[in-house]
Amino acid sequence: MDNGIKKCDGAQEVDHHQTPRNMTIKGILGLLMANVDADDKRRVISLGMGDPSAYSCFHTTAVAEQAVADTLSSQKFNGYAPTVGLPQTRTAIAEYLSCDLPYKLSPDDAFVTAGCTQAIDVALTILARPGVNILLPRPGFPIYELCAAFRNLEVRHFDLIPEKGWEVDLDAVESLADSNTVAMVIINPGNPCGNVYTYQHLKKIAETAKRLKFIVIADEVYGHLAFGDNTFVPMGVFGSIVPILTLGSLSKRWIVPGWRLGWFVINDPCSTFKNPKVIERIKKYFDICGGPATFIQAAVPHILQQTEEVFFTKTINTLKQTADICCNKIKEIHCITCPHKPQGSMAVMVKLNLSLLKGISDDIDFCFKLAKEESVIILPGIAVGMENWVRITFAVDPSSLEEALGRVKCFYQRHSYRQTEC
């Protein structure tokens, strides 16, 4: 085992042409891992999963670890928490998010969830009703499509524009929306694209949503993980223009995805969406879906209030370094191009040029053959809605990232119409 990633012993080749297009990211990455050649003695390097905790250069702060240890050892938090979350946890989340807003959130605006995935499920569930639709970005995070399917919620996709820093195609939003549209989703900082939206673009999104009469779901699980020219602006800043449902978690910023601590927050200072009926519906749903461990919830106030800025700065600097390495190495691999250098989050989308490759039919074929021949895992773009693109995660230690992309270069040279020695 190396960096928490184990090569699959006795792996058998997977018929990737039968890979369903609607699998989860984890499901597809599992199939890719199973396709690794068991006789390859090199370590498997995954640039597919956004779990930075697998690498030694990314680790959480001692403040967070001690806070959890203290709440667990106190024996005060072994019982059930309120289904909407511990009061002190909801207060801490509301105060934390309010620091970046022109108004103050109430603890009653914040609900504690089992990671951002549950927050997504809550958001789509409370909006679902017969005949309505929701607008989702392409590329995007496939959990939204899966949750929508379970709720019989029609999905309509609007494109993000690579040449404009993956901005929302607002003209497409205008043409897709109708009287049955209940919400649009934005992911900022972007997964899978690495974009960070400007204040001006976010304001245009809010004004468009207001004019078309739907709310905005703001997925900010990568909140504040910005290292380019654009600073992170929470969508909740525009809550006075249009109601915003903010989804977030500790997982990425604090490097603790396995703690499964997230939040669902209503940014609606004008109370145009938030009313007793809506709140009662939310509370009833929380009664049946459960939440994160009580002792993890109890640690949240200390984590949010006591984590020093130097911890965040170190993470940001490391991500900037690895993003730079990723982009520079990609320039050496002529079959992939990066239309926009990442400015945040932990991943980047790159376009495949299949015309330069022999025997590679599409992005799935590329990724499965890469896994088998080079023991490198990257995510096919079809998993996030973009055929013949791939997503590369750069939240990896620099040496592993350089080695992995060096192997991708060898793979390209071997499959190129102009074969050269690696």
Image (spheres, grey):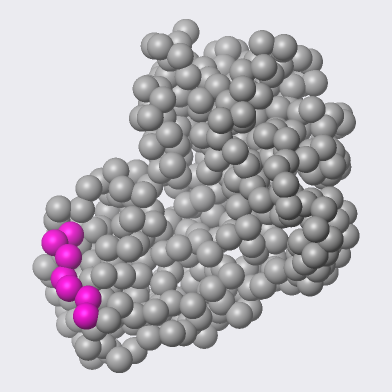
Q: Is residue 326 above or below residue 228?
A: below
Residue under the image location 29 percent in, 43 percent down:
22
Which stretch did the figure color magenta? 10-16
Q: Specify the quadrant that holds the N terminus.
A: bottom left
**Depicted 13 relative to depicted 133: above or below:** below
Q: Is residue 377 depicted above or below 282 in this figure?
A: below
x%, y% of residue 259?
A: 63, 57
Residue 110 drawn at (x, y percent)? 74, 33
Is residue 234 at least partly visible in the picture? no
Left/right placement of residue 65 relative to residue 132 reads right
Between 89 and 147, the one nearer to me in the picture = 89
Residue 328, given in percent of the width and then of the height, sits at 49, 74
Q: Is residue 276 left or right of residue 113?
A: right
Does residue 358 show up magenta in the picture?
no
At which x and y percent is residue 48? 41, 64
Most common SS among magenta residues: loop
Q: Quadrant of residue 159?
A: top left
Q: Residue furthest left?
A: 359
Say whether residue 70 is left or right of residue 401.
right
Residue 1 seen: yes
In the picture provided, is 333 more to the left or to the right than 305? Answer: left
Residue 109 versus residue 212: which sits nearer the camera? 109
User: Which residue lies at the image location 80% right of the left edge and 43% below the top edge?
Assistant: 89
**Quadrant, the C terminus:** bottom left
Residue sitting at 17 percent across and 73 percent down? 12
